[in-house]
Image (cartoon, coloured by chain):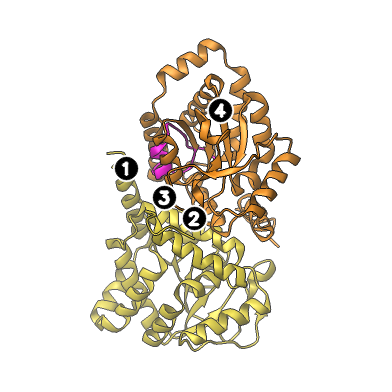
Chain colours: A orange, B yellow
């Protein structure tokens, strides 16, 4: 359906993949729009991993490796776009993988857990309870999973949930292409990069960094700097846009 | 489903409306993602009509009023978000309203024509032919409609179609929140504003502008200036983002 000569072919093919997942119910319809928001910011960043994003990815690896009980929270969009990358990161980091959805139904949870399992992840799927201080279905998680975590990686997260997790004293690592989003502002560490570029970099750093590197990264982590660098990259690109 | 205390409530409700339209087949799944891209740019513009956007809207009105055969092209997203606003603009401008879809099926065309008719538009729905110099379904339009138009308003258009229409010697007015998009760059005039804010401003200007105003607007129209102003507004907002 998409003409191969279209200049935005790759972006359109990804959209079509997400659309297929939406038809099956894996991705929420609202998740398609959220993806579009991310796409716009990625476009402004030049669709590449910036220097500051790579620093954030290495710092994220250091945080996951230093954690006692690290958890990776997975939603529909993440499973549709990067289930293999999640499985690889789990292997490298030893983190627990748990499904948490904004638009939650038991059926969607089961479908997403199946996708992750098929991709090689070991999914934590115990009984869920309303444990987070949030209204509606966003409150659900598992007592031995996310609720007990000290470090949580939340790719593509809602700002309220990110804030609630941080408010519970957890270290929250967000992956969010919008450096101005509430998620980006509330996370302990924000990776302003596209998911399928970010996850392999974190995985690589989990195994590749020395203990000295990790200690240095943890002691110098500065989210305000990372966000301001992302904004600077976007502004720089915009200022040359009509050249 | 969406908590009313959510800080992005309005944006989420619009997304849900589009999601409902996608379930019915009015909006293409890919249209949801495209909406998200627009949302991101609207966010960067401060979700308001800027001074330069208002100038573009007045200029668009002058172009439509000066046209011999003006046409408004409507796709699924436009019908879902702004069918009443399209009907009002048709009344004020005398333009022909024609449905043209990227993801085209006869069923979708019929559904969208019905929505527009119900909203009070007089829809031009003659026999469509492959008349535009484009691959795939994007080539379809009507000989007495868009094909013969001298001025076309294309809200939320694909860059290739916008370029093809301009290449046929038509004056193309685009409504696109992304000032860097191929559509924005290729249009004769680009309105960098959100659809439901832009259309009523064009309608108001169709009836409110004097002939002197319209002549002045037509003789001073400068799309490069309008796009650079939109980019300047975004850059300005970004530079204060972390204050």
Camera-side residue of B209 and A213:
A213
Q: Nearer the viewer, mark 3 or mark 1?
A: 1
Q: Say if B120 sits above or below B29 in the image.
A: below
Q: Are marks 4 and 2 in contact (CB under 8 Å)?
A: no
Tell me the CA gap for discs 4 and 2: 32 Å
For the residues carrying marks 4 and 2, which lies nearer the camera in this image? 4
Q: Residue B221, position in %: x, y?
A: 33, 67
The quadrant of the picture occupied by the C terminus of chain B is top left
**Along the viewing direction, whichever of B116 and B239 lies nearer the viewer:** B116
Whether callout 4 and callout 3 share a subunit is answered: yes
- Quadrant in which residue B136 is drawn: bottom right
Whole-percent x, y for residue A59 in the image: 49, 24
Q: In this orientation, does residue A240 appear?
A: no
What residue appears at the point 51 percent right and 81 percent down from the top-left corner? B149
Q: Is residue B162 above or below residue B235?
A: below
- Nearest the viewer among B176 and A159 is A159
Q: Are marks 4 and 3 in contact (CB under 8 Å)?
A: no
Question: What subunit carries mark 4?
Answer: A
The residue pinned by badge 3 equals: A242
């Amino acid at each position: 359906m998409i003409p191969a000569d279209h200049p935005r072919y790759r972006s359109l093919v990804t959209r079509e993949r997400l659309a297929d997942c939406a038809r099956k119910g894996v991705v929420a319809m609202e998740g398609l729009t959220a993806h579009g928001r991310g796409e716009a910011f990625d476009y402004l960043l030049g669709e590449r991993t910036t220097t500051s994003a790579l620093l954030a990815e290495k710092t994220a690896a250091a945080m996951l490796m230093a954690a006692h009980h690290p958890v990776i929270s997975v939603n529909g969009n993440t499973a549709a776009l990067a289930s293999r990358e999640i499985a690889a990161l789990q292997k490298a980091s030893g983190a627990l993988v748990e499904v948490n959805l904004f638009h939650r139904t038991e059926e969607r949870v089961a479908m997403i857990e199946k996708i992750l399992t098929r991709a090689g992840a070991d999914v934590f799927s115990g009984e869920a309870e309303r444990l987070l201080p949030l209204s509606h279905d966003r409150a659900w998680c598992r007592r031995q999973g996310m609720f007990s975590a000290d470090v949580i990686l939340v790719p593509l997260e809602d700002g309220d949930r990110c804030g609630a997790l941080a408010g519970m004293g957890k270290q929250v690592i967000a992956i969010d292409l919008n450096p101005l989003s509430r998620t980006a502002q509330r996370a302990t560490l924000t990776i302003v990069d596209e998911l399928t570029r970010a996850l392999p970099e974190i995985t690589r750093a989990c195994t590749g960094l020395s203990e000295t590197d990790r200690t240095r990264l943890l002691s110098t982590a500065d989210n305000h700097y990372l966000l301001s660098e992302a904004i600077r990259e976007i502004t720089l690109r915009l200022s040359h846009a009509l050249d």
